[in-house]
Amino acid sequence: MNKENQNHHFLKSAMKTVFKHRPMFFLLLFGTVGIGAIANVWPSLILRQIVDGPLTTGEGAIWKMAFTYLAAVLVIGILDFIREISATVIGQGVLLDIRKQMLEHLQKLPMKYYLRVPVGETLSKFTADLDAVNTLFSAGLVSAMADILKILGIFVALFALSKPTGWIALGALPIIFFLSNFFRKNIFVKQKEVRKKVSDINTTIQEVYSGLKIVKTFGKEDLFSKRFEEKLEAHRLAMNGNSIYDAWFPCIMQIVRASVIALALVVGASNNGTTFALGLSIGTLAAIADLFVRMFEPVEAIASEIQTIQQAFAGIDRVKGFFSEIVEDKHSDETENVIHMDPTVKSDIILNHVVFEYTDGKKVINKATFTIKEGSKVAIAGRTGSGKTTILSLIAGLYPATSGTITIGGANPFLLPASERRKYMGIVPQNVQLFNGSILDNITLKDTDITREDAWIALETVRLGETVRELEKGIDTVIGEGEVQLSFGQMQLLSLARAIVINPPILLLDELTSGLDALTEKVLLNAIRQVSSNRTIITISHRISGIIDADTVHIMDAGKVVESGTPEELSKMDGWFAIYKRLEERGWKVG
Amino acid sequence: MRKFGPPKGKETLVQFLLKYKFQFIVSSVAGIFYNTVIVLGPIFLGKLIDAAAGGTTELVLLSALYFVGVTSFFQFARFIKRWYMRDQFNHVACDLRQTLLDRILGYKLPELEKETVGDLMSRTVGDITLVVDTVMSTINEGWDTWLLMLSYFGVLLYMDWKITLLASLLVPGTLLLAHMMRNVLYRYSLSSRQSASIAHTGLQRYLSAISVLRLFGREEAEKSTIMEAYEQQVKWNIKQILLQQSLLPVYALIAGLGVVIVIGMGGENVRTGMWTVGTFNAYMVMFIAFSGRTRVAAKVFNRWHGAKAAWQRIKEKMILDKNEKIADTDTFDLRNTDQLKVSHLDFSYGSKEVLRDICFEVKAGEIVGITGAVGSGKSTLINALLGLYPYEGDILINSRQLSDIADSQRNNMIGYSGHEQFLFSMNIEENIIFGLEYKNPELKDTLTTAALVEDIERFDDGLKTGVGEKGLKVSGGQRQRISMARAIYKKPAILLLDDPFSALDIATEQRVIKRLKEDFKDQIVILSSHRLSAFENVDKIIVLEKGSILEAGTHNQLMSRRGLYYEIYQAQKFMKEGSAHE
């Protein structure tokens, strides 16, 4: 991916996509916003007609006018409805498209991103941050636009009815706006403070509950009770700070509204003896009062919409940060580097001075050198942190080596295309990962090149055939649904079937037998024996007793191989292998 | 006097509320004022319109003054109501949280270990919030919806009962419609949340199983599964908003039909002179406000169900019977402990027996090391000696049974550092002193003994360095030593250290043991470890196997026995030297 592409704006491109598919809704949105602003003043004008017509002079059909009023109210309701729906359809469409873009981006990120960034952080980009972006459509921009037009409509109506009251409205506008902005801002600031105090309280509670044993062994219950009290009081005071604005806000706005209406009516008064009188009809006066009431709502709303928009932009920035994560340029010159290896021809795996560092610069693998001959059965053992699982990941091509080379039949496994990897090696990870779907789906992983027959053969090979045949829906049984629950051992067998279904020449196993009962373990070992002929098998062993049927055992410590040989040779040697075995038999921690 | 706590007498929710009678009475009076006087707003506005249309200047100004004045009055009452209500419920939430936390702090340890932190958290935080919010909004809605509607309806009836009855005929329809749609809306939003949660779980699995996905080339397929869920979510969201919004024109129609009657019949009243235009206007404003409120009215009782269950959950943990304490009348001075004698000690967690027939003796000034395989009972033995769990057999301190010693005395006597070291988000000094008196020389000695001096020097803020939430700002090894220092600073008669050296290098480990020997000349130190290098200089070693003592003696005695201890010692020596050479 080149630089320009990286800088493309995800929001713009999402809007374009939605516009292409749903142009009608954009039209409806802008249409209803415009017409809505005009329709909004209609009821006030009808009120004026009613009051000045049938009510005072007795002219005109009052019921007809009443129904016109009803029609006006209905039209406003329907316009609001269409506007909200259009905004929702567009907003949700944009959201969906951004999510799609983000998922596509995830696919391109290197493994190191996943090691560096905690799962929760990436998840919150998809949830909290995107929700903020969504409010831009659901509550921010569209409503702000509609509200501004509504205010304009009211001004036009007021100026048309009586210029001086129009000027009063215009004069009141900044007062209302700044006043509600003042309250909104302060409430926002205070709420932030409250949220901070709430998180303080949560931290304190979490801490006290997690450290209860220490608190109790030291007899410090009172100390922590008092500490908690301080946090509660701080929270209460912060809440009070918020409450004072929150409690005053609507009250003050109502008083201001009453004052402005009173002022407009006094100015508009039609009495005979005063100089400032305008002599407006009573219907006009009623309409003016009504319009002023209608003006306050959008003005107050704009103050909060501005805030929403600000928050939305903060969310957009955070999502933008996600898109600027550097992607892996693994397949830049794909055509040259793809392994030209025939999967049916077995090849030696050669590690030469391999060094691997995760992000912190610590050498997890430190100049590991060894060769795994084609068709051999190799076990790799060592204590936690010795680097054995990392070696497996490197051979599988999950990461590039920091320095040194890993080759399988002369080619770098890291450059294998994702969709091809299965053909060269089958991998059975320690934690079985089952996916939503049928047993068949879990074997093929939705690869359409694999036939049902292939899947059955794999199931038979791992001795699961009978179990699956006994199920009502057989191989199409959806795992985890209803009555069908696979045992842990069966899941491991299924995971093995998945690895061998394409018949790869290399099999990588991350110790399967941990946590199994003796019987299942036996079944599994038999299954592995069944599949191991004519294949290179590399097994990670967390226990020496788990090493079975290996031609060669490599013991790793601190990132390198410290001992190699057949199990028989090694157990005679009084070295690492023998020591591990002894400690293990005694149930002692190897670390 | 504590700021927050339970009410006197019975601890019912009502009693918690009534602790703040003043706020309650003031907010109630203000609430009644606001929601009744509010009807004067539209009435005085009507009078102002009438005056403006034909009255004298004085009348116009006076009417305007009345209108603004009366509005200010009832809005002020509203402010009083809002403020005192918030104040009261703020206090109630604090009281509930403090009470619950204090009760939980008082639990006996075996009771506590049945609880999960997450569950206790959700009761102390979420459930209390739910209860307080629900009660407050119910009371608030009681005033601002029901009383308000009642006031309006009363005045409307008084102004013209025929129009009122006729025009409000359809108003209950709003209530009914809102009520009916509630279930459908709930279903839609539930479906939307379900899809969101499927997508969320999918994404979570995607992120945590990324290596498997990559190895099998399965990313694309998993991505489309997540996208499908997102698409479902969007579908339900749109449906929900479609239904919600489509109700608006219907509400408008219902309210509008009422308004038609008001205009038609009210207009008649004006024509016949019964009403002025202002009265007509006032009636219309009130009627629209009245019918608009009905929609809100349906919402009030929705949350009660959840709140009741939440209160039940809070009460469950507030009950006192998990808090018995041994009366603190004992005057026995335990700080001069010179002997700890354990004989025929059996100990079990629930029904599982983990220690059997443990016997040993320690004298003041001795260090005892406990070792054994994984699950042999090392930590359990230390736990038993804490005196916070029930046991069988004897643990005698100066021939006094541990379980008979009052809590406060026992706490003074025993110092403990567990193998999951827990620090509190205070600074290092506070974590070590931990509520005791600050004594400079003792603190310095403690830091030396716990091998913390160099670490502290390297921190910019020294001892005042904050350790962060759960102590995560300092390294694992530092956490371990700070936790050990907390136990050492107390200078307890019996110091219990459970696996204190796992993150220390062997040289430091030896130094710490040497210092402990010097500092605890008159006290007893018991420590556990699976690394035998720690025990070369201790006075006595106990090797456990499956909950019983397998071997005991000094390092030299055990080495010459050539038993398990010897075997493990040799194996560990090989690995240590092997690693160092490579």
Image: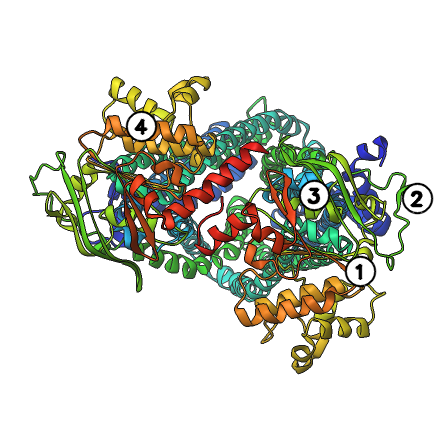
Query: Which numbered marker is on residue B501?
Result: none
Q: Nearer the viewer, residue B275 or B170?
A: B170
Give the foreground label among 4 and 3: 4
Using residue B514 as the reference point, say whether residue A97 is left or right of it.
right
Any part of residue B473 in sight = yes
Q: At which x and y percent is residue A469?
A: 69, 81
| Three-letter code, disc 3 | Phe
Query: Which numbered marker is on residue A504?
Result: 1
Using residue B448 as the reference point, say whether residue A420 is left or right of it.
right
**Label 1 Cα crowd, 10 Å radius (few <14 / some 14-19 / many 20+):** many
Label 3 sits on a secondary structure element that is helix
Q: Mark 1, chain letter?
A: A
Residue named by callout 4: B514
Gap in angstroms between the C-alphas marked 4 and 2? 65 Å
Residue named by callout 2: A335
| Three-letter code, disc 4 | Lys
Residue named by callout 3: A137
Gap in angstroms between the C-alphas marked 4 and 3? 68 Å
| Three-letter code, disc 1 | Pro
Q: At which x and y percent is residue B421?
A: 39, 39
To the question of a shared chain for discs 4 and 2, the answer is: no
Residue visible at 62% across and 71% down? A523
Q: Nearer the viewer, residue B567 or B6?
A: B567
Ranked by sequence position, the earlier of labels 3 and 1 is 3
Residue visible at 46% across and 48% down? A589
Gap in angstroms between the C-alphas marked 2 and 3? 44 Å
| Three-letter code, disc 2 | Thr
Give the quarter of the figure containing the N terminus of chain A.
top right
From what the image shows, is residue B110 above or below residue B474? below
From what the image shows, is residue A544 above or below residue B554? below
Any part of residue B54 in sight = no
Q: Is the image coloured rainbow, by chain, by secondary structure, or in one colour?
A: rainbow
